[in-house]
Amino acid sequence: MNENHDFAIPTLPCRSITETIKFYRQLGFEGGAHAFNSDYAVLHRGSIKLHFFTHKELIPAVSSAGCYIRVQDVDRIYQVCAVNYLPVSGIPRMDRLEDKPWGLREFAIVDLDGNLIRIGQIIQR
C-alpha cells in the first residue's frame, strides 16, 4: 500500500485475539497481537489491513460490525478463502462468489465473532 494516500483501517471487535489471529491466518493474513497491547491485533494481507480489539462480552449472533474490502482480483482471494471449507450458514461462514446487480462481483465472510467482511471488485462492463 502506498502510505502517501489516505486510507481507512477497519477496527473490529473480537472475543479472543489468539483465535482471531488463527482464523485470519487461515485466510492468508499475516500479523498478530500488537507489541504493546496483547488485547489488540494488527493483521494484513497485501495492502488490506484489519485491526481487532478485545470485546469479551461480544455476542457474535447479534454483532453488527463489519467492513467492505474492494480488491482488484476477487476470484483469487475467494479461491484462497475457499480452501478452508467454511460452512455456508451459521458463524463462521462464507457466502459464494457472485456477480451482484449493483455492478460488483463479491462474496462475504462472517468470522468467529460475527464480523461481516464483504470482499469484492467492480465488474468491468
Image: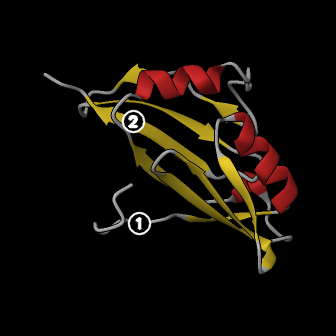
Q: Residues within 10 Å of mark 1 (few under 14, many from 20)?
A: few
Query: In the image, what residue type sits under mark 2?
Result: Gly
Circle 1 SS class = loop
Relative to 15, 6 lies left or right: left
Q: Residue at x 64, y 53 (%)?
A: 115
Examine the rendering and report whether any part of residue 113 can be seen.
yes
* Residue 114 higher or lower than 108, as above or below: below
Query: In the image, what residue type sits under mark 1?
Result: Ala
**Picture coordinates of residue 37, whole percent (x, y):** 79, 79
| Pick the front one: 14 or 49 | 49
**Picture coordinates of residue 79, whole percent (x, y):** 56, 19
Colour scheme of the rendered structure: secondary structure
Q: Label 1 to label 2, Cα distance in Å?
A: 16 Å
Per the image, the residue denoted by label 2 is 120
| Pick the front one: 28 or 118 | 28
| Pick the front one: 21 or 116 | 21
Q: Residue at x 54, y 36 (%)?
A: 108
* Residue 28 higher or lower than 50, as above or below: above
Q: Residue at x 81, y 45 (%)?
A: 22
* Residue 120 higher or lower than 123, as above or below: below
**Picture coordinates of residue 61, whole percent (x, y):** 75, 51
**Picture coordinates of residue 95, whole percent (x, y):** 57, 27
Q: Which part of the image, by quadrant, shows the C terminus?
A: top left
Per the image, the residue denoted by label 1 is 8
Of badges 1 and 2, the one in the foreground is: 1
